[in-house]
Amino acid sequence: MRRFEAEIETARGGGAYIAVSADVVAALGGGGRIPVCASFEGVECTGSIVSMGGGPCLGVLKAIRERLGKGPATPSR
């Protein structure tokens, strides 16, 4: 398990994501699409780390952002 803190960033079309650093991707075995079970301050979700134009990232669902009361540019763990 890897734990890190990142800001929620705005994606095109109103979505949001968290950028994932290369060392975290390497610790998870690398690859193009990495399935993960993530927790955003205790709110669990299942998703994939994928490589987008700006690098690897994990999408943050709107329902999760609303539950946490957080949006883009808000630190999350």
Image (tube, rainbow, N blue to C red):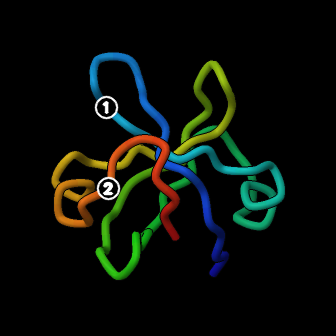
From the top left corner, tell me how far across and down residue 36 is, in percent. Answer: 48, 63
Q: Which mark is residue 35?
A: none
Residue 64, placed above or below residue 13: below
At x 26% / y 48%, what residue is drawn?
A: 61
Q: Amino acid at mark 1?
A: Gly
Dot 2 falls on a residue whose secondary structure is: loop
Q: Amino acid at mark 2?
A: Lys
In the figure, 18 relative to 40: above or below? above
Eyeballing the image, is 17 above or below 21?
A: above
- Write the residue at 41% across / 41% down: 72
Q: Are marks 1 and 2 in contact (CB under 8 Å)?
A: no
Q: Is residue 58 found left or right of 61 in the rendered image?
A: right
First-in-chain label (1 vs 2): 1
Marks 1/2: CA distance?
13 Å
Query: Is label 1 in a helix, a strand or a loop?
Result: loop
Percent across and percent down for residue 6 are 60, 57
Foreground pick, 61 / 35 = 61
Q: Dot 1, crowdedness within 10 Å: few (<14), some or many (≥20)? A: some
Reading the image, the residue beneath label 1 is 15
Image point (70%, 45%), residue name:
31
Determine which residue is flagged by label 2. 70
